[in-house]
């Protein structure tokens, strides 16, 4: 894994050691989801991705050749300069419309998240990791939060609970 991190760094990726020797975090300058798709197209499944990173996990069952394959596949992923990337803004903080308790006990209906702008969330809408809500129970669903969710590839077509 250390050799793979060094190899990725030589290719122009940032691949810092972040405490877990068997997790390879590959920073790819604002193109995390593209690199995730690139690995998937080569039948390699990453643990997760976000706008800037892909995380690969090495297990006891992986051979040195399979670990090296991560670098082989990454080598065919063209990096772009940092100036050409679009960074995500901080996670937006929607307006609290009801207390979480009131929203929890309120009558709810289901509707696609993308159609719920202006409605009050009847459930937490969060991504993992880190598992912190982007829109919390009782907050008003706004366009800024939806745009953030779109950019991180959250499924906004999915039905969600909203307060009636």
Image: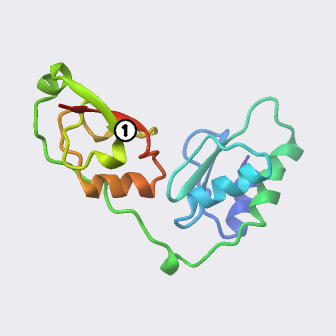
Circle 1 residue: 126
| Among the 4 quarters of the image, the one containing residue 64 | top right
Q: Nearer the viewer, residue 18 or 84?
A: 84
Q: Quick one: label 1, few (<14), some, or many (20+) residues within 10 Å? A: some
Q: Nearer the viewer, residue 118 or 24?
A: 118
The residue sitting at 66% across, 70% down in the picture is 12
| Among the 4 quarters of the image, the one containing residue 75 | bottom right
Residue 123 visible? The answer is no
Q: Nearer the viewer, residue 16 or 164?
A: 164
Residue 76 visible? The answer is yes
Side of 145 relative to 63 (left or right)? left
The residue sitting at 71% across, 57% down in the picture is 38
Instruction: Reply above or below: 55 against 99.
Output: below
Q: Position of residue 89 (x, y in %)?
A: 33, 62
Colour scheme employed for the rendering of this structure:
rainbow
Q: Secondary structure at mark 1?
A: strand
Instruction: Reply above or below: 63 against 103.
Output: below
Q: Position of residue 143 (x, y in %)?
A: 27, 56
If the image is split into quadrants, where does the C terminus sit?
Answer: top left
Q: Position of residue 118 (x, y in %)?
A: 19, 48
Side of 30 relative to 96 (left or right)? right
| Number of marks present in the image shown | 1
């Amino acid at each position: 894994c250390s050799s793979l991190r060094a190899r990725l760094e030589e290719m122009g990726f940032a691949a810092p050691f972040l405490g877990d020797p068997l997790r390879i975090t590959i920073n790819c300058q604002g193109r995390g989801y593209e690199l995730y798709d690139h690995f998937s197209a080569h039948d390699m499944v990453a643990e997760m991705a976000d706008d800037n990173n892909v995380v690969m996990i090495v297990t006891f069952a992986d051979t040195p050749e399979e670990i090296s394959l991560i670098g082989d596949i990454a080598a065919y992923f063209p990096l772009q300069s940092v100036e050409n990337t679009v960074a995500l803004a901080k996670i937006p903080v929607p307006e609290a419309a009801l207390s979480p308790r009131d929203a929890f006990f309120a009558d709810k209906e289901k509707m696609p998240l993308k159609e719920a702008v202006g409605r009050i969330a009847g459930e937490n809408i969060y991504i993992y990791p880190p598992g912190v809500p982007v829109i919390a129970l009782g907050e008003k669903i706004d366009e800024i939060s939806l745009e953030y969710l779109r950019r991180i590839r959250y499924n906004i077509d999915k039905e969600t609970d909203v307060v009636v």
